[in-house]
Image (spheres, helix red, strand yellow):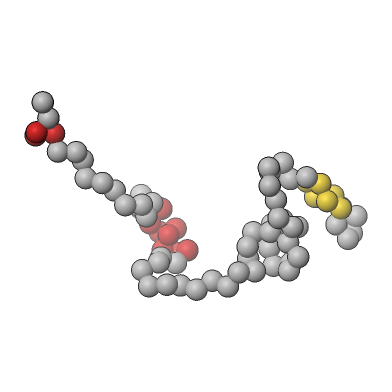
Amino acid sequence: MEIVLDDGTVARSERFMVAICTCRRSRTYPWCDTSHRPREKTAGTPTSDERARQAREGHDGRATRPAPDDRNAP
């Protein structure tokens, strides 16, 4: 996908599907990154700083299942 911006520069994306930013809040302008959406922190949801810290510490935030109990395996 190619688009020509107001200043004449051409923006190109190789993605299968793109969205064009019309609010100009996107850090990836002219492509939309949903920056226009209001962000609300809900109880129990980690902030981006908390997620970054967890990633550094090796916690990716996904639930883990206990190992299968193979005491009853045939």
Residue name at image x 68 percent, y 43 percent: 15
In the image: residue 45, left or right of residue 36: left
- Tell me the quarter of the picture where residue 30 sits: bottom right
Residue name at image x 12 percent, y 30 percent: 73
Quarter of the image that includes the C terminus: top left
Image location of residue 50, percent across then percent down: 41, 63
In the image: residue 5, left or right of residue 17: right
Image location of residue 2, percent across then percent down: 81, 46
In front of the other: 51 or 66: 66
Residue sitting at the far right? 8
In the image: residue 5, left or right of residue 74: right
Image location of residue 37, percent across then percent down: 60, 69
Image location of residue 62, percent across then percent down: 36, 52
In front of the other: 27 or 62: 62
Residue name at image x 44 percent, y 67 percent: 47
Quarter of the image that includes the N terminus: top right
- Tell me the quarter of the picture where residue 21 sits: bottom right
In front of the other: 38 or 60: 38
In the image: residue 74, left or right of residue 19: left
